[in-house]
Amino acid sequence: LATIFVMPLGGKDGKAVVEALDRHKKELRAEIARKVNLKYAADIRFRMDNSFDEAARIDALLRTSSARAPERAAAPGMPKDKSPA
């Protein structure tokens, strides 16, 4: 089983795109087998690629004030204003 992650241009109508690809799965699988010169091709399934959305979500989380690194504590025996960089 091979999973193919797809993202439509503009990121819209993803569900419709995946449904259309699923409807033509047999033809696409045969074409892949021909182009790659395979005697047998794995079954294929299509899934939406949400990696860009997930990356944007993680980026937003990292930019929040709660995710910022706390100020470094001074090393033992050093005043707080002279902590190592």
Image: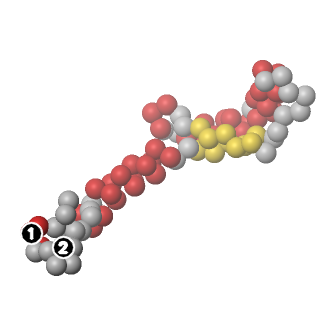
Q: Give me the disc on residue 81.
A: 1
Percent x, y for residue 51?
50, 46
Residue 85: quadrant of the picture: bottom left
Q: Is mark 2 in CB contact (under 8 Å) with mark 1? A: yes
Q: Earlier in the sequence, mark 2 or mark 1?
A: 2
Q: CA distance from mark 2 to mark 1?
A: 8 Å
**Visible in this render: residue 26?**
yes
Percent x, y for residue 19?
66, 40
Q: Give me the disc on residue 74.
A: 2
Instruction: Identify the residue shown where x is 46% and y is 51%.
Output: 54
The front one of 83 and 2 is 83
Percent x, y for residue 13?
52, 39
Q: Amino acid at mark 1?
A: Asp
Instruction: Name the secondary structure under disc 1.
Output: helix
The residue sitting at the right extreme is 39
The front one of 75 and 40 is 75
Instruction: Identify the residue shown where x is 67% and y is 35%.
Output: 20
- In this image, 24 relative to 72: left or right? right
Q: Amino acid at mark 2?
A: Ala
Instruction: Identify the residue shown where x is 19% and y is 63%.
Output: 84
**Visible in this render: residue 19?**
no
Instruction: Name the secondary structure under disc 2.
Output: loop
The residue sitting at the front extreme is 77
Instruction: Identify the residue shown where x is 74% and y is 42%.
Output: 2
The front one of 21 and 54 is 54
Up-down relation of residue 15 to residue 66 (above or below): above
Decide: few, some or many residues near mark 2? Use Cα within 10 Å; few <14, some 14-19, many ≥20: some
